[in-house]
Amino acid sequence: MLIEIWERLRGYHKWIPIEAYVWSASDIRKKLGNRHQVPPDSQFSGELLVWFDDYELPHVGTFVTHETSPLYQLLEGESVEIRYNPLKPDRYYCRPHFLSWAAILTKAVLGIAVFGGFLAWRIWMIFKHRGL
């Protein structure tokens, strides 16, 4: 429910849904040739997402992922649903990827809050014990 509200606020609901495929940078160069700009392999530790817009023009997007992400398990040639901006087709949004990073960020913030709360409690106890 909250994710749908956030997506509406960001305008992603207006973007075009499409399947994007996981490819390596070297395979993209082989399949698309030199006529399309593909970043060098050294810039990527992972895979790339490739999708084709309404005019059948290819677009390449990168993603950084971690072990708990649904994209981490994708193999080359497999697909994931994304939404791309019809005005800027190189911009895309992938809900599973966003949710996996949001979960990590939430855990980090909660961990810091718990640690900060414990630290504040401990300092309060020290001052209380000393009668300050």
Image (tube, grey):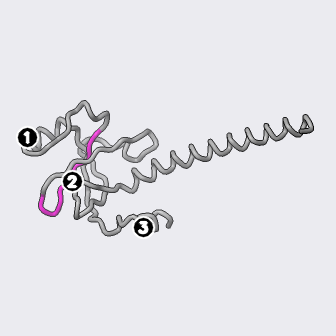
**Place of residue 34 in the rendered image (x, y in percent of width and height, measured from the top left):** 7, 40
Q: What are the residue bounds of the magenta stretch?
A: 47-56
Residue type indicated by callout 2: Trp
**Place of residue 119 in the rendered image (x, y in percent of width and height, measured from the top left):** 73, 38
Q: Secondary structure at mark 1?
A: loop
Task: Looking at this view, name the residue that lies furthest to the top.
Answer: 42
User: Residue at 26% of width from left, 57% of height from top?
Assistant: 19
Task: Looking at this view, name the residue that lies furthest to the right.
Answer: 131
Task: Write down the residue under mark 1.
Answer: 34
User: Residue at 14% of width from left, 43% of height from top?
Assistant: 37
CA gap, disc 2 to disc 3? 24 Å
Dot 2 or dot 3: first in sequence order is: 3
Q: Secondary structure at mark 2?
A: strand
Q: Is residue 48 magenta?
A: yes
- Dividing the image into 4 quarters, which one contains the C terminus? top right
Task: Write down the residue under mark 3.
Answer: 9
Residue type indicated by callout 1: Asn
CA gap, disc 1 to disc 2? 17 Å
* Residue closest to the eye, 106 or 20: 106
Q: Mark 2 or mark 3: which is in front?
A: 3
- Indicate left or right for 77 with 97 as reference: left
Residue type indicated by callout 3: Leu
Task: Write down the residue under mark 2.
Answer: 51
CA gap, disc 1 to disc 3? 38 Å
Q: Mark 1 or mark 3: which is in front?
A: 3
Dot 1 or dot 3: first in sequence order is: 3
